[in-house]
Amino acid sequence: MSVVFGETFTLTLPGSSFLEFGFFADRLAAFFILVISIAVFAVSIYSIGYVEEYFGKKNIGSFGFLYNIFILSMILVVTARNALMFLIVWELMSVVSYFLVVYEHEKPETRKAGFIYIVMTHIGTGFILLSFLIMAGASGSFDFGKFSAAGASMPPMLKDLVFLFALIGFGAKAGIVPLHIWLPYAHPAAPSNVSALMSGVMIKTAIYMLIRVFFDFLGAGVLWWGFLVLAIGAISALTGIIYAVVETDIKRMLAFSSIENIGIILIGLGASMIFFASASPGLAAIAIIAALYHLLNHSVFKGLLFMGAGSIMFSTHTKNIEKLGGLIKKMPVTAVLFLIGVLAISALPPFSGFVSEWLTLQSLLLGFGLNDTFTRIALPVGAAALALTGALAAFCFLKAFGIGFLALPRSEHAEHAKEVNMPMLIGMGIFALLSVLLGILPFYILPYLDRISQTLVDASVYHSVSFGVLGTISMPAGQISMSTPALLLLMFICLSLPFILYLYKKEHRVLYETWGCGQPVSMSRNEYTGTAFTKPVEIWLASIYRPVNETQATYSVSPKLKESFKFESRIERVFEQHIYSPVIGFILGKSRTIKAVQTGSIHAYLSYIFGVLVVLFMFMILGGR
């Protein structure tokens, strides 16, 4: 509690005086520990029931060991106060999470996902190491406290390098575009409880370090830094949700949605950096509060949705949305809890996602009055990207819930589905309750986030934000106000009226079978599919998706009589084919060229050594002159 009110807890490990190994917790670190702890509590309860799937098939003891080490590593990452200590626990978190991703290693797609994940995370670690080395050279120490003191006096070029290296390094773990390539592979491959932790809190440890580096180490006083972070956030948000819309694998869809929400957090973070560099600390405080609140909300509703997806897989043994349907009758409690997560992630009032996205949007709108021309262009573009992202997210998750839970079962998997066990429902229930409470009671959270913003941007806005009847939140100068409790009451009234009218005037209805021209009609085969639902968006964004359609016909006795059609449509993986594949091909090509020096002859290797020594002696002679 003392940390919340401004004190910093510090622990120095014995025998580490030279490198100052140890841990600390200030307001920012304490907030992330809270986020991790909430997620771990709910997911751990859920896991008690979820691991029944592996009984008799896998080693549960090894999974439990890795799971607990993973939790410990995340807490150590946000509390490390030394660069070397941080890299040790960061690597521990990466390696342990890799083993959790490949827990079902007998599947080829799981091994591929683990390989992509471990490669991308180590590329990011390389850039993190470079940024820390520059800071250590400027400060003469690996202690984070010395980094903060040295940041103000560093040459601008070195500060820019630290900013870029940190953005790339931690951005790879957070999943920013185009470094997001591992997320759509790793999350579907990992067990669902691990996916809930990875998406809900692990990728947020990268956001923690971005905030620490930008505001604490470097001072966040450079305007173009904020523009770059805002642009990356907007691109990541739009790209993530655009690809999530057309995805039929429910866990892969949620993975793309995580990229979207990381983008929303970065929009708030970038706006805060712009305001801070523009000498508007009040606006910077509002934007950073919005980013932190969305970070908390996303950890809750995304954890809920991943656990909901895990419950669907637990009961139906499929991740394909097109093979679901009718689950609201088979799994009614899961359906209600999943719906709450859908409403929250779609930013619909009065749920949690609405509040944080509303705060992010208002911070952008309040910045329209700044004098800088480029700022007055960038902020409206960011606001438009955020609004479009919200609309596409609602469309995406309407498809996920409607196709997955409504209508009739589309397969045997869905037909024989049953409600999951009690620990899984309790775990989801905790997150569902928080998704509601964080939406209707934000005024209890904002004071604590305001204290964090005061530490980061040296400004407090809580006293300029007024709270009226029914929890109405009014922004500075009373320009904009919002009340989620009032919205909840209004929604309850609107939903109650049709039900009341139905009971008041209930008519007798007679149901008949569908006429099919004398042929039997399969109702499930005639239902609206997720692919059909998203087809208008696919046509609208065809230049981005670059869809590939294949039609295969089966003929009967005559080549003119077609017995059946098989139609397949897929979208092009643009980033893989046009960025990563060429780079990998170039590296492999150069590797084959360099491999030619490995002749296997000892005489050739001695010749190489002799040649290098000759060159070194020549440099020494020329240097002596």
Image (cartoon, grey):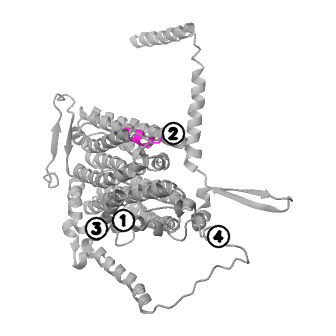
Quadrant (top left/top right/bottom left/bottom right) for the C terminus: top left
- Residue extending furthest toward the front: 56
Question: What distance separates the C-alpha of mark 1 from that of mark 4?
Answer: 39 Å
Judged by depth in the image, the label closer to the viewer, 3 or 2, is 2
Are discs 2 and 1 less than 8 Å apart at CB?
no
Q: Is residue 318 left or right of residue 571?
A: left
Q: Which residue is mark 3?
A: 437
Instruction: State the SS at label 2.
Output: loop
Let me know if residue 199 appears in the view: no
Q: Residues within 10 Å of mark 1 (few under 14, many from 20)?
A: many
Residue 162 drawn at (x, y percent): 35, 40
> Within the magenta stretch, is there residue 189?
no
Q: Which residue is mark 4?
A: 522
Q: Judge depth for marks 1 and 3 and give the one in front.
A: 3
Circle nearer the N terminus (1, 4): 1
Q: What residue would you read off at disc 2?
A: 106
Q: Is 277 positioned to the left or the right of 382 in the image?
A: left
Mark 4 or mark 3: whose residue is earlier in sequence: 3
Q: Which residue is mark 1?
A: 353
Disc 3 marks which amino acid? Leu
Residue 394 position, x and y percent, is 46, 68
The magenta segment: 96-104
